[in-house]
Image (spheres, rainbow, N blue to C red):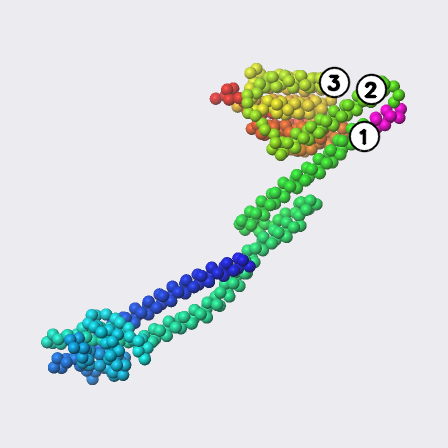
Amino acid sequence: MRITVLYTVIFAALFAGFFFSAYHLFASQLDRDASNEVTDRAEGLRGYLKFENEIPVFRFDGALPENAPLVRDETRFYQIYDPANGRIVAQSYEMRMLGSAIVLREHESPVQNGFFDVSTDEGRLRFHNDRVRSPAGHEFVLQVGISLKSMQDALNRFSRLGLWLGPLALLLAATSGWFMASRALNPVRDIVHAAQKLDLSNLDHRLPVSGANDELDELAVTFNDAFARLAGSVGEMKQLTASMAHELRTPLAALRGEAEIALLHGGSVRELKRVLSSQLEEIDKLTKLIGQLLMVTKAESGLLRLEHKPVDVQALLTEVDDTLSVLASAKGISLTFEYDRDLMAIGDAQWLKHAVLNVIDNAIKYTPEGGSVAVHGTRDGNYVVIDVRDTGMGIPHNAIPHIFERFYRADSSRAKDIEGVGLGLNLAKWILDHHGGEISVSSEVGKGSDFGLRVPAFPSMSKV
């Protein structure tokens, strides 16, 4: 409604401006035509002007028959007077009926060539002044006039036309404005109705896109992208809930079962210590899981702040070796580290260490007893490359594109009941991405996997 009213008001203003401009131009053109007509009549009338004894007279007897109507029209309103004494010398019948005093009173000294209008009972008349001289040089003033009634009638008809067309045009403008506004807002209504149908159980529904590539399409596409991201987040939340239920159910059941057995049958201190030791292991697993979830949540919410400082990669790998060597030995896996000297990267040492730790820990998890995990640190142009190669079970080809997704775990890993909820590699990728680096993987089922971590090198060691 507001759009229609605004459109109608604007149209009314434009129509009024156009009408008054057209009226002014029309009136000006009619005025010029009237002036040209009275000038032409004055010039034609002078052809019949004669002087007899220095007195101007008009002789129409010699007019051609075809010129008779023109002569009659031209001789309706005219008079000649002597400016010296104001005496009228010659006058048409219509002028005598109007009264010469009218002209003289309206224009007391019309001795200059020009135009002037007079209001009479016949309506407004326009007169033209023209000087004429007798053979002896005596000057007279010839006044020739025409009626402006036809001009005024034309202007009145034009005004009446505007008064009729104005309301009709406004009605058409309001109707068309309502129709156009309705058509323009139909896509918005469609978007509103489609958005009202969206809920958490129907996030795959999308807003309609007309294909016009206009602002409304851009709005719909933007909302659809937002809904897609929301659907992905909700899907990840559902997956997180399922993964958490799966991961927490087993250790909690174990804790409860051991506690019940200890209460019912545990009698010796040694048995109670064994139960408590087992429960501490399960608690550690739960603590680690909760820590990973908290870290992922901080990363996604933008609460993590990464430093960009020189990082000694050799010292970083040495710390990782000290941390994971006991775990590798406990599983009977050979863990070896080889790296170039003076390897310096740029970034946050603690977070880079966390990324490398996650990748190597993941390799140890999926490598059976007797296998090996080899870590190599080298320089490749403007990057430091940390390569982690294992002889584990490998990753199915169709699972490789998904292993860096949050909470993703391949079916093979679930079958073996390996710890974790699929957060380590996702967090490692996040860390590498926010360092301006990248992580890649190549794998073959039954032969192992090869992860490559590329981190920007410290400028002093970058190749020119």
Residue 333: percent from left, percent from top: 71, 18
- Amino acid on which the number 1 mark rests in the picture: Ala
- Asked if residue 178 shows in the view, the reply is yes
**What residue is pinned by disc 2?**
273
Nearer-the-camera pick, 133 or 455: 133
Q: Estimate the spatial distance between the alpha carbons at disc 1 and disc 3, rounded to whole Å.
A: 25 Å
The range drawn in magenta is 256-265
Instruction: Describe residue 86's horizontal placement relative to residue 331 as left or right.
Output: left
Residue 330 numbered mark, or none: 3
Q: Secondary structure at mark 3?
A: helix
Q: Nearer the viewer, mark 1 or mark 3?
A: 1
**Residue displayed at 67% across by 33% down:** 406
Q: Does 258 lie within the magenta span?
A: yes
In this view, 246 is above or below 275: below
- Amino acid on which the number 2 mark rests in the picture: Lys
Q: Secondary structure at mark 1?
A: helix
